[in-house]
Amino acid sequence: MPKKIIDKVKAHKDYKNAQEKQKKLDKAAKEIKDKKVNMSKTTDIIIAIAIVVAATSTFFFPGDDVAAWGLLLRAITR
């Protein structure tokens, strides 16, 4: 891809917002790992969901936070 196009994309506010959101999701994933959450227990799954919600400042299942729920599912399957 031409560098000119890459630079335009990286300068866009949506790209910057996505980068910030990814940093928050990475932080949430680290917190889940650090707490050694057992994803076979319902209470621990709720704790993991709360960590993702708190880290990304979102509510349950908003359309624009598919990445947050994708990360949660990835964390559950590990």
Image (tube, rainbow, N blue to C red):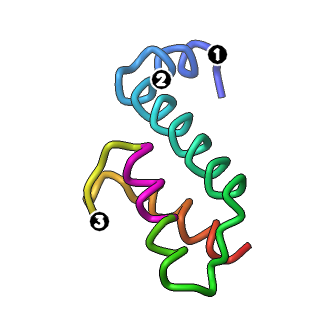
Question: Residue 29's spot in the image, x, y percent?
Answer: 62, 52
**Residue bearing the label numbered 3:** 61
Mark whose residue sits in front, 1 or 3: 3
Question: Which residue is rendered at x = 51% and y = 64% of the image?
Answer: 48
- Residue 21 pos. (x, y %): 45, 37
| Mark 1 burial class by Cα count in 10 Å: few <14, some 14-19, many 20+ | few
Upstream in the sequence, badge 2 or badge 3? 2
Residue 13 found in image quarter: top left
1 sits left or right of 48 in the view: right
Q: CA distance from mark 2 to mark 3?
A: 27 Å
Magenta span contains residue 35? no
Q: CA distance from mark 1 to mark 3?
A: 35 Å
The residue carrying mark 2 is: 9
Eyeballing the image, is 48 above or below 31? below
How many residues crowd mark 2 within 10 Å: few (<14), some (14–19), many (20+)? Answer: few
Residue at disc 2, secondary structure: helix
- The segment highlighted magenta reads 48-55
Q: How many marks?
A: 3
Question: Foreground residue, 64 or 35?
Answer: 35
Amino acid type indicated by mark 2: Val
**In terms of secondary structure, what is the magenta stretch mainly?**
helix
- Amino acid type at circle 3 is Phe
User: Which residue is at the front of the view, 4 or 65?
Assistant: 65
Q: Quadrant of the N terminus?
A: top right
Q: Image height check: is 57 above or below 48?
A: above
How many angstroms separate mark 2 from mark 1 (CA)?
Answer: 10 Å
Disc 1 and disc 3 in contact, CB within 8 angstroms? no
Residue depicted at 66% across the width and 76% down the height = 38
**Regarding mark 3 in the picture, which secondary structure is present there?**
loop
